[in-house]
């Protein structure tokens, strides 16, 4: 509760955390209190909008990165399949090189 | 597998509008690749058959790259129409430069991957350089992100070069060169 009732009047306070403890900062009543409340509300709205925009941007980035990763996996698979079907192999993650047995198997199938 | 050089825009348009590959074909292909890499040559004829008979596998990659391209352009250009147009032109120019005159399906796919990775690296580098008021942990996280993007970029270039070296179908001229003709046409007519 930012507005607190003391007697017949309302006073605007704001809770602030300071050195692990919550402190109440007094702003005032009437016009001063309303102005302070408006300012705080506007600041909170701005922070929320910035947070939402940042989150949306992060989601957009992670979607694009995920697409790139999926594209990479698909390309790796097709490139490997094409090279194997062309008679090359990659033993123990070395460079791709001619696969004699593979070529023999491909020739026999034709 | 026969790699046919083709660069017609109609074909690429079909590839973009086509449905993604059936997961079963993709899974089967992945399984065959795994078996072949483990040293089983008997699966190669079937693998070649699948690559030739299922164009949707290639089309799926085409779809992915076009979606990824749109996503990166939206991020890089930040809804600025001029930047969007210039990015599109840059990408088209890169595609032409890297692909050459008559790239094969495989080469086009790898070129697309290189371009997407380049866009990712560019975006992340710019974002890292312009990040203000971030903590040390956030900065190191961003740097790691850039490094993994650069690694992907270099791997994609390496794969493209390797495929071009081993299966140079796209680099060969579309009209075969004749270095020596023992009987030229005018002599035959005479």
Image (cartoon, coloured by chain):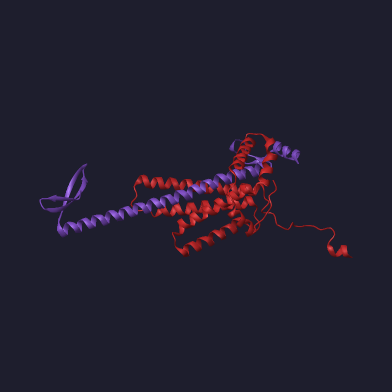
Q: At x 73% / y 37%, what residue is drawn?
A: A104
Residue nearer the viewer, A86 or A99: A86
Q: Is residue B187 visible?
A: yes
Residue farthest to the left, as pictured: A7
Residue farthest to the right, as pictured: B190
Q: Which chain is red?
A: B
Question: Which x, y percent locates residue B164?
Answer: 64, 49
Query: In the rendered view, would you say A78 is above or below B36?
Result: below
Q: For the C terminus of chain B, which image quadrant?
A: bottom right
Q: Is residue B128 visible?
A: no
The image quarter containing residue B140 is: top left
Chain A pictured colour? purple
Q: For the N terminus of chain B, which image quadrant?
A: top right
Residue farthest to the front, as pictured: A8
- Decide if residue A110 is on the left or right side of residue B135: right
- Decide if residue B148 is on the left or right side of residue B166: left
Residue nearer the viewer, A91 or B52: B52
Residue farthest to the top, as pictured: B39
Question: Which x, y percent locates residue A38?
Answer: 23, 57
- Decide if residue B138 is on the left or right side of residue A39: right
Q: At x 50% / y 63%, what residue is drawn?
A: B86
Residue nearer the viewer, B142 or B7: B7
Q: At x 85% / y 65%, what residue is drawn?
A: B186
Question: Which x, y percent locates residue B89?
Answer: 54, 62
Question: Which x, y percent locates residue A90?
Answer: 62, 39
């Amino acid at each position: 509760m930012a507005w607190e009732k003391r007697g017949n009047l309302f006073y605007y306070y704001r809770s602030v955390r300071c050195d692990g403890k919550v402190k109440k900062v007094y702003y005032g009543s009437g016009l001063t209190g309303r102005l302070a409340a408006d300012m705080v509300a506007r600041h909170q709205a701005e922070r929320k909008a910035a947070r939402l925009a940042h989150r949306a941007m992060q989601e957009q980035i992670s979607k694009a990165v995920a697409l790139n990763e999926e594209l990479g996996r698909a390309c790796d698979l097709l490139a490997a399949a094409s090279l194997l079907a062309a008679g090359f192999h990659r033993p123990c993650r070395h460079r791709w090189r001619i696969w004699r047995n593979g070529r023999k198997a491909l020739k026999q199938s034709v | 597998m026969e790699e046919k050089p083709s660069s017609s825009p109609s074909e690429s348009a079909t590839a973009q509008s086509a449905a993604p590959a059936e997961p079963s074909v993709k899974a089967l292909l992945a399984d065959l690749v795994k078996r072949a890499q483990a040293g089983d040559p008997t699966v190669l004829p079937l693998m070649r058959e699948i690559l030739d008979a299922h164009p949707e596998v290639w089309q799926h990659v085409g779809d992915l790259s076009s979606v990824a391209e749109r996503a990166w352009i939206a991020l890089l250009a930040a809804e600025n129409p001029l930047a969007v147009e210039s990015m599109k032109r840059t990408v088209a120019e890169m595609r032409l430069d890297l692909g050459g005159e008559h790239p094969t399906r495989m080469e086009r796919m790898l070129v697309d991957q290189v371009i997407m990775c380049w866009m990712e690296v560019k975006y992340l580098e710019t974002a890292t350089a312009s990040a203000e008021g971030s903590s040390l942990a956030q900065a190191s996280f961003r740097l790691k992100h850039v490094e993994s993007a650069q690694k992907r970029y270099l791997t994609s270039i390496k794969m493209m070069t390797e495929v071009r070296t081993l299966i140079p179908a796209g680099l060969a001229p579309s009209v075969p060169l004749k270095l020596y003709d023992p009987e030229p046409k005018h002599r035959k007519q005479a």
